[in-house]
Amino acid sequence: MSISRRSLLNASLAFTASTAISPGLSRASTLVAREIISSTRLFVSQCIAGSTVSATFVDGIAAGLYHSNGQLSPPALTPVVSGSTFGQVVSDLEGARGSTVFALLSGEDAVLVNEGLRVVGAKVVSYGTHNANAHRFVTGSFCAGVGGIFASSLEAGVGNCTIDEICLGRVSAAPPRLVQSGSEWPFRLGYVLARSMSGGSSDVPASVLQEGWYRFPFDTDLVSVVSKI
Amino acid sequence: MNDSIILPEGLTKTAFAKAVEAFRGVVGADNVIVDLDRLVPYAKIMIPEDEKLHQPSAVIIPLSVEHVQSVVSLANQYKTPLWPISTGRNFGYGSAAPATAGQIVLDLRRMNKIIDVDPEMCTALVEPGVTYEQLRNYIEERKLPLWISFPSSGPIVGPVGNTLDRGVGYNRCGEHAANFCGLEVVLPNGELVRTAMGGVKGGSAWQAYRWGYGPWVDGLFAQSNLGIVTKMGLWLMRKPSASKTFTAVWNDLEGAAKGVNVLRNLRLNNVLENSLLGHLLYGVACDVPRNALYKGPGAIPDEVVAEIAKKAGAGIWNSLATLYGTEEQIAVNFKIVKEAFAPTGAIVLSEEEVGPNPVFQHWKGNMTGRPDLSEFGIYNFRGGGGSAWFAPLAPARSEDFKKQVELVKTTLAEFGFDYLGGFLIGGRHMEHVCELAFDRTDPEEMQRAYLCYDKLLQVNAAAGYAVYRTNTAFMNKVADIYGPAQKNLNRTLKRALDPNGIIAPGKSGIFV
Ligand SMILES: Cc1cc2nc3c(=O)[nH]c(=O)nc-3n(C[C@H](O)[C@H](O)[C@H](O)COP(=O)(O)OP(=O)(O)OC[C@H]3O[C@@H](n4cnc5c(N)ncnc54)[C@H](O)[C@@H]3O)c2cc1C
């Protein structure tokens, strides 16, 4: 049976500015080193594939991975093509076994991917819901936590947004943080998620942020997922 | 075992660790999850409460009835509550997460065998992990002349969980609680029972006759916490030789209200076997993000909705139904339908007259055995991942329709939320199913959504209405609306069957 639907498609994963950037300005790292990433896969919803929001997110991941521990060469981000059914989503996730998966998804696709992750028994390190004004993360054991690191990474910019994080491994929820920037969140989010997964400073290199297009205000509601399958 | 912070109520970490080891001895280490990262997908909810309030302590994934029985025995021994889920996709009602934090989710998805499908009797016998998509594939592959009835989230959800929560579908067998036949249940003491004709050794009428002998107990296991269903018999619809989906549209509430009486009568006369009456905005919301429709404050105003309807060439209220039978029967019945609707001012359109229209095709698919995922587009509408279905039940009468629309729409608007609703007209009754879409990234909006749902319950109760089903944040409050006598009876049953309170404490507001 074929159930037609808009589904996930690989983003165009060209490394743009990120592969050429110089190492960032350093500040004391707030990250807990996690396992070094050996293989990464990327899922991006078809409806945003190729858009500025997904391209900047992908660039952020690439930059984050490139800078991780100063050891990793830029990883090959494997394009993951999903088909037209939930079964296909599950089989794409199955195909990503042994990898760290980064995903940027529409609300609709996020529901299916979360269900797929449940079916394949994946670890979900971070599940974030995002828009220009607010970011909300749900994490499991990573109470260091992605939200706080992301908040720090945004603080230098302009505009307002709140960042909230629910960590299952922490007794009480931390109060939401209000930070002074939101506009270039996809790049910084990608960067922070990649750095969180591999350990290292979360500071976004100044040279990267000089790229004007990262400051484009994104008016899209999206979900990010980091998972180890 | 890692540092799971939430423990079952009253258990020490050491006792919990012992219980986990015991469960692992039954189902295998991999099938008992306590790793917090692996628990995240089970904790992901859409309702207006924090994940923390519904965070499971662990997940157990059994493979067989014997596993379930052993797990239940151990749960009694260690006093660990078990929250059973079948496919666990109760989106907008609590998803896979338990009613209260610390319960162990008993995920039955690996028990996914289709045990039997009988094309002559139009019946099936399935395990809890079977999805509608799986059942449909099974039928298609064998070219059986059968159609399944499923909810709008069809492909990925399943008949056992849906039916046990009294879910609804859209063909002749759409009232699922009325179309299951025979259960196998693991009781809270670990005993196994097959209900109704399932008790007769060597018998073959288990899926043919619902009532058996003596008290009919099957209803005790729906929306309840008195057992874990491990098999369910289903009644399926024989694929008709022909079908005809049509729509009747109105631009005014008065016309649609008259339409409700007509739909009820057509159903009571067995001319129609299914019918829904939906507001335009729900269909639009499954396809178009809200900020493309409206950027102003508060709920989308009626004038904007009217403008959208005009642009789309659609009605504000749209009824959809499908006639089944032979071509001759359908021709006669369609004539009856058109004549019945004429005095209401409805425009009645056949598929050919509607032309290519994805909303029409989606509902036609729902009524003719073809599930799709298109309604999940609703999660792109407002953004932020918040969803709670509000589903009051009312008699299928014009006055109740008008009252319902007024009550629900006004209350939603008071809190700044859009009316994304529709009515499933089931004959004498109708379910008024409304999606409360909100942004979970905004703590103020999440709180507002909670208060809105609460107020919706209150204003409906004051007018004599109550929801037929609710999410895990509001189960106690809804149980209160149904009154102390029912609450006491439910508790008496619970204490008798499950004195340790190990099955799904809090389900439908029932505790020991
Ligand atoms: C876009 C969209 C459209 C939807 N449309 C519909 C619709 O048309 N009709 C409708 O009814 N719903 C609808 N839903 C809601 C929901 O997705 C379905 O009702 C779905 O079938 C429920 O999930 P499930 O089948 O996975 O059941 P589960 O989540 O597995 O079970 C539901 C509940 O039943 C109980 N339960 C489950 N299994 C057992 C067991 N074996 N023993 C004892 N108790 C058990 C538990 O309390 C559980 O929480 C919709 C949701 C979305 C997102």
Image (spheres, grey):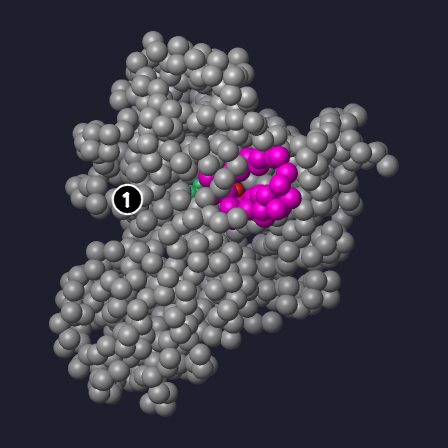
Pick out the residue farthest to the front: B327
Q: Residue at x 53, y 17 (%)?
A: B329
Spot occupied by residue A207 in the image (x, y as percentages of width and height): 17, 82
What residue span does the magenta drawing correspond to? B132-158
Chain holding disc 1? B
Residue placed under numbered mark 1 in the picture: B288
Bin the neighbour count of mark 1 within 10 Å (Cα to Cα): few under 14, some 14-19, many 20 and up. some
Q: Quadrant of the N terminus of chain B?
A: bottom right
Spot occupied by residue B508 in the image (x, y as percentages of width and height): 55, 38
Pick out the residue farthest to the bottom: A71
Q: Residue at x 33, y 90 (%)?
A: A70
Tell me if residue B382 comes above or below residue A184 in the rendering. above
Q: Is residue A227 magenta?
A: no
Tell me if residue A39 comes above or below residue B436 in the rendering. below
Name which quarter of the figure residue B182 lies in: top right
Total labels: the figure holds 1
Name which quarter of the figure residue B142 lies in: top right
Pick out the residue farthest to the right: B201
Q: Quadrant of the C terminus of chain B?
A: top right
Spot occupied by residue B137 in the image (x, y as percentages of width and height): 58, 46
Q: Is residue B338 visible?
A: yes
Q: Amino acid at mark 1?
A: Val
Q: Residue at x 39, y 14 (%)?
A: B338
Q: Depth check: B44 or B456 in front? A: B44
Q: Depth check: B90 or A150 in front? A: B90
Tell me if residue B512 comes above or below residue B442 in the rendering. above
Tell me if residue B378 comes above or below residue B467 in the rendering. below
